[in-house]
Image (cartoon, coloured by chain):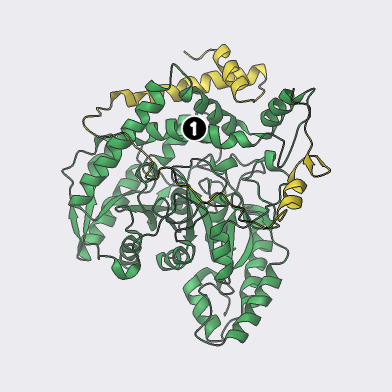
Amino acid sequence: MITKEEVRKLSALSRISLTDKEEESLAKDMEGILAYVGEIKKVKIGDSRPWEPAERNIFREDKAENGRGEFKQVLLDSAPASENGFFKVKKIL
Amino acid sequence: MKTDLQNMTVADASAMMEKGELTSVELVSACLAQIEKKDKDIHAYLEVFKDALEQAKQADAKRKKIGSGRAPALLGVPIAIKDNMLITGRRAGSASKILEGYVAPYDATAIGKLKEAGAVLIGRTNMDEFAMGSSTENSAYGPTKNPVDLSRVPGGSSGGSAAAVSGDMALAALGSDTGGSIRQPAAFCGIVGFKPSYGAVSRHGLMAMGSSLDVIGPLAKTVKDAEIIFSVIAGKDKMDATSTDVRPPSKTKKFSRVADLSDFVESIGSGGVEKSVMENYRASLDALKSKGFEVVKIKTDLSALKYALATYYIIMPAEVSTNLARFDGMRFGFREEGKNLLEDYLKTRGIGFGKEARRRILLGSYVLSSGYYDAYYSKANEVRGVIQKAFDGAFKEADVLATPTTPTPAFKFGEKTANPVEMYLADIFTVTANMAGIPALSVPSGFVKKDGADLPVGMQFMSAYGTDFSLLDFGKAFEKR
């Protein structure tokens, strides 16, 4: 039973604001979806190993691959607000 | 007519341009004229690139310069690109409001390879927002219509790419496939859709949805065309640690055994598969048998495959909730201002993301949260292991596993939007391949009658990991049945 409280907690965690109506609708949707996906509890695992990615800890050399400042302007231009070479955001602390 | 787009393939066009019977300018102009004529009704494109004709001129000039027989594989060929792939200096947004205004700072590796091969990038195509959907009804910019029947969806999430090719507004397109997003729209629109083996095409520059599932692949009119494009975009890339090289064409074995999965197909819950689709499936298997293929029943227990969709709708939202965390109104796209930083996040993401995106992010957060992690996410990874094992067993008994690509032909707009799970079920046969990372090809297999219309359907063929070229060869044989 997915409650509006749970939806509210999840939306806070995901940083997504929802209206009251949206919370209600999502609670109902999630109820239905979880009922469907919850069926996997019926699957017998036997001796198979859980899925794992084929790769593990792929590293590269810790050195610059681009020219100095090569992408700086284009990245700053993409941002909603920037100033003097910084992304401009509201105060964090 | 030199530029009879309806019957022109990438292979044909390349041959004609090589012989001097056609120029890229003529070809691209024809596509642009078709777009002008049809796209106001279909809406396959979010943007047609204003420099498409200029690219074509450059392709023609390059062909003159380099001489015959040495033209790169796709020189002058107009290809449409799904809106979730980055092209330097061009807008990209995964059909989402949250990326409004975002301009790509670099080329996706697959795009770079298309450019190197001389392709003309004609425009970016519509899609379900962040690749979440099976109908392109979740685009923040309005839906795309199926060129075969405008009252029906083209499928999704690569609906725009499928409609562009099916509507003769491009010779081919790139799409991405996480649970069926290339194959399902290809089947609905009557064209070929190929999902390569996971890792066969670099994901660098593809906006991530489900990082263990996403694959870039071609949508085209023929399997040969899909193969040409795949050959261009495939290859291990240092910018994508999950990328790999698949077995080259010279080292592929010829497939001869096809599995008849009628029992599995029919067992898919609540009478989901339409009778006409089952008939088409059986007819296709019969056609393969008369072509000399051995059609076999599998003894390996495939019952875990029935849970592939449920497993997918745990793993994929979990990965989505992580991958979409970066869209926070700070570094790219749109920001909705609040009273403080936290409100900036809450409002930007609340408004910038559409309904389905919000639904899946919340679902993902739920299955990853403590108290639920074991029952859902951990269990899903275990089931994924069982599914992979089932496929391993099946591929010892057959080279190719066949299913209908979709349980139904293209549905009408609004038909499946009331209940999310109804929509998810459209991918019941396609998700299996993404869960195991194996290659899967959808080939048009004829038409079924529905509501007085003739609607295309597709046959899905899957084969073992890394056997992409063998699968494509097999697909060509099926086309000739």
- What residue is pinned by disc 1? B317
Locate residue A57, reporting x and y percent.
44, 43
**Chain rendered green:** B
Q: Is residue B127 left or right of residue B260?
A: right
* Residue furthest right in the image: A84
Residue sitting at 77 percent across and 23 percent down?
B340
Locate residue B307, reporting x and y percent.
33, 33
Is residue B148 visible in this depiction of the protein?
A: no
* Residue furthest left in the image: B299
Quadrant location of the N terminus of chain B in the rendered image: bottom right
Classify B252 as above or below B396. below
Q: Is residue B339 left or right of residue B332?
A: right
Quadrant location of the C terminus of chain B in the rendered image: bottom left
Locate residue B132, reporting x and y percent.
53, 39
Is residue B93 visible in this depiction of the protein?
A: yes
Q: Element at badge 1?
A: helix
Which three-letter amino acid code belongs to the residue tagged 1? Pro
Q: Is residue B104 left or right of residue B371?
A: right
Pick the front one: B36 or B401: B401
Pick the front one: B359 or B460: B359
Classify A22 as above or below B118. above
> Color of chain A here?
yellow
Classify B98 as above or below B243. above
Locate residue B252, reporting x and y percent.
29, 65
Crowding near the residue tagged with mark 1, few <14, some 14–19, many ≥20 C-alpha atoms within 10 Å = many
Q: Chain letter of disc 1?
A: B
Residue sitting at 44 percent across and 56 percent down?
B193
Classify B255 as above or below B11. above
Residue sitting at 50 percent across and 15 percent down?
A2
